[in-house]
Amino acid sequence: QIETNRTRIETMTAKYESDAEDLLKNINSFNARAENGDFADSASFYAERNELVARQNQLQNDFESLNSLISETNAMIQEYNNSVIEVGKLYDSVNSRIQEPATQIQD
């Protein structure tokens, strides 16, 4: 499950970063056009603005989902690591009880 999540995290991160970069470019373009008065009317301005806001909200949702998956995976890794430590302690405990056989046999 950890490996599956790792792959999902990598895929989701790449998509998130690409979408964030694309949105930033679109926002910068929108703001430049707004400053220059390039919109024909307020309806077209608000239509495009609302689309950008919706994309921004979706990106925030994607970010939260990604963080949730990362947290879930980190918890799984911690649980796995704790299990490995416990197994190591058990092994050491069993190993410490083993005594070496006598090295010499008397004639």
Image (cartoon, helix red, strand yellow):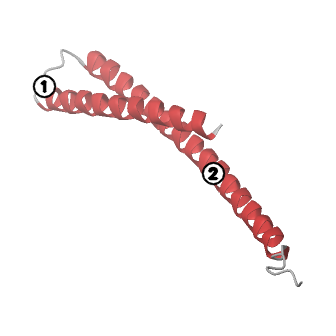
| Res 41 → quadrant | top left
**Spatial distance from mark 1 to mark 2, Cα to Cα?**
53 Å
Q: Which mark is residue 77?
A: 2
Determine whether the residue tagged by mark 2 lies in a helix, strand or loop.
Answer: helix
Residue holding disc 1: 37
Pick the front one: 60 or 75 = 75
Residue at 38% x, 24% y is: 50
Q: Residues within 10 Å of mark 1 (few under 14, many from 20)?
A: few
Pick the front one: 76 or 39 = 76
Q: Residues within 10 Å of mark 2 (few under 14, many from 20)?
A: some
| Res 91 → quadrant | bottom right
- Lower sequence index among marks 1 and 2: 1
Reply above or below: 66 against 102: above
- Nearest to viewer (mark 1 / mark 2): 2
Residue positioned most to the bottom: 106
Rendered location of residue 10, percent (x, y): 46, 35
Residue at 70% x, 63% y is: 85
Compared across the picture, whether 103 is left or right of 27 comes to: right
Label 2 amino acid? Answer: Ile
Residue at 59% x, 43% y is: 68
Rendered location of residue 84, percent (x, y): 70, 58
